[in-house]
Image: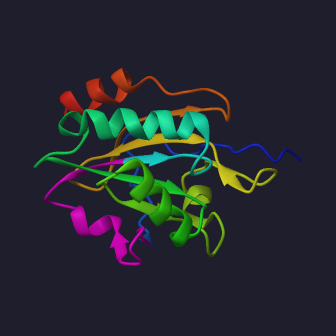
Amino acid sequence: MSNEPEVTLSVGDVAPDFTLRNQYGEQVTLSSFQGERAVLLVFYPFAFSGICTGELCEIRDDLSAFENDDVQVLAISCDPVHALRAWAEDQKYSFPLLSDFWPHGATASAYGVFNSTTGSSVRGTFLVGTDGRLRWSVVNGMGEARDPNAYRDAIAAL
């Protein structure tokens, strides 16, 4: 039996709903955006790690390409809320960093991107339409950085 995640969601599937706490301890529910904004879900392994910092800084530095009146960015890891708050303050991230800490990795598991060996998600990116259905997704392994142009293109195609 492998500990590697197995993505079982496909474009057109209803995105699994969740409620997670952000870096300020506030609850954020995916379905609360339904009918109003698409949501770019960015699962990443660990706060304060090199590739993850680079990827989220790419979003931070060109935020209007990823988050605007039509799209909300939600970045998700299995880190605890306090670590996410420290990282957000350190890196000046203004978008929500959500904690999938407890039950540990439940949301990452629902999206098929939880790695039980590392206790973290892999780099899964999902674009959820205003109808709550997956419009696009890509999954990269632990050491593989994402191509932000791919999700820029997916957002532009909404």
Instruction: Name the spot of residue 68 as percent of width and height, x first.
Output: 15, 45
Which stretch did the figure color magenta?
A: 21-40
Q: Quadrant of the C terminus?
A: top left
Instruction: Name the spot of residue 11 as percent of width and height, x first.
Output: 40, 38
Q: How many marks?
A: 0
Query: As drawn, is 110 to the left or to the right of 27?
Result: right
Task: Give the image quarter of residue 153.
Answer: top left
In the image, 64 versus 128, the foreground residue is: 64
**65 falls in the magenta region:** no
Query: As drawn, is 147 to the left or to the right of 6?
Result: left
- Does residue 59 lie above or below 82 as drawn? above
Q: How is the image coloured?
A: rainbow
Instruction: Name the spot of residue 82 as percent of width and height, x first.
Output: 53, 71
Query: As drawn, is 132 to the left or to the right of 45?
Result: left
Question: At 61% across and 69% down in the image, what residue appears?
Answer: 101
Question: At 62% across and 75% down in the image, what residue appears?
Answer: 102
Instruction: Name the spot of residue 149 as percent of width and height, x first.
Output: 34, 21
Farthest-out residue, right: 1
**29 falls in the magenta region:** yes
